[in-house]
Image: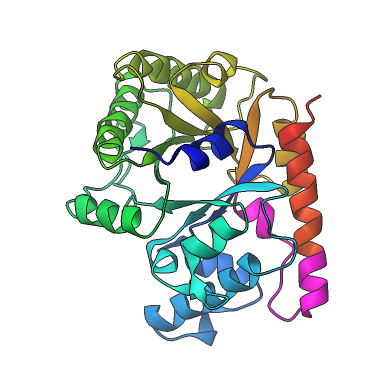
Amino acid sequence: MLDTQMLDRIEQGAGFIAALDQSGGSTPKALKVYGIEEDAYTNDHQMFALIHAMRCRIMTARSFTGDKIIGAILFEKTMDSNAGGKPVPQLLWERGIVPFLKVDKGLEAEANGVQLMKPMPELDPVLETAKAQGVFGTKMRSVVHKASPSGIAAIVKQQFVVAEQILGHGLLPILEPEVSIESTERSRCDVMVFEAISRELNTLAEGRKIMLKLSLPMRPNLYAPLVNHPRVARLAALSGGFSRDQACAELAKNRGVIASFSRALLQDLHHSMTDKAFDHALGSAITQIYAASTAKV
C-alpha cells in the first residue's frame, strides 16, 4: 500500500522532482560538468564515490529542501548510502522530499525506432529493499527515436507491465518513455507516445495510480488529458538535453506539468565552489525550476 502522506505530497505539493540518478554512461558526463575529468578516477568504485560526494553536497545544501522540491530520484548506490550522517531516504523525507529509486538497468540497442529497457531479473528484491528503506516510488526510462507505431507501442507496453510489478510492492512507479529531442520526427513521436499511454492507462485496475515523466512536447499542453487523468498521480517533464533556460521556458507553457530535471538542475555547479557559492548556484537553479513548474504562461 502506498504511503498516504507521501502520496499527498506528490499529488498536491507545489514544486518539482530533482533527478539525482545518473548511472552507468551518464556518470562520467555528470562529473565532467561538475569539473571532474575522467583522469581523476581509475575504476567504477572511485567514480561512484565522486558522484556520491557530489550528491551528498547537493542533498545537504541549505537550499535543497521541501520548500520547492517535492521529490528526488536516487541511484541504487545512493539509496543504500548515508548523507549528513543519515540514510539518504530518511534525510530526504525529514526535509519534506519524497524519495524515489531508479530501477531500470539501462537500454537495449535501438530497434524499430526505439530503445527498450534491458531485462530486470533482480527487480523484486530491489523493490523489497527500497520499500524497507522508506522509498516511496521508482523510475524507469526507455527512449523513442522514430515515429514507429509498433516500436512506441512496445516501449509503452513494457513500461506498464513493469509498473504493475512495482505497484504490487506498494511503490508508485514513474514511467519515462522519453522522446529524444534529436529525433527528426519529434512532434509525431510526442503524439504517438501520448496516444499509447492513454490506451494503456485504461488497463490499470481501479484505484491504481502511476506517475509519468515525459519529454517536453513540441505542442504545448499536449499532455493536458494525462495531467487530469484519475490514474495519473502527477506528470513531470525531463529536460532531455535542453539548457535550464530552454527547459524552463518550454515547461512554463505546459499547465499542470512539473519538472523532473537532472542536467538542467546541476549545470552551474562545480566541485571547486565554496559552500556558499555552491548553495547560491543551486538555490538559483531551484528557484527558476520551481517557478516554471508552478507559474504557467
Question: Could you tell me residue 120's position as x and y percent?
Answer: 22, 50
**Quadrant in which the C terminus appears:** top right
- Which range of residues does the magenta coloring cover? 261-280
Give the residue drawn at x 50%, y 17%.
Answer: 191
**Nearest the eye: 17 or 151:** 17
Residue 209 shows up from this direction: yes
Direction from residue 52 to residue 162 in the image, left or right: left
Answer whether residue 277 is magenta in the image.
yes
Residue sitting nearer the eye, 273 or 133: 133
Q: Is residue 181 visible?
A: no
Q: x%, y% of residue 233?
A: 49, 28
Q: Residue at x 41, y 55 (%)?
A: 134
The residue positioned 21% from the left and 47% from the top of the image is 119
Is residue 295 on the magenta stretch? no
Please say if 87 is above or below 139.
below
Residue 33 at x, y percent in the picture: 64, 67
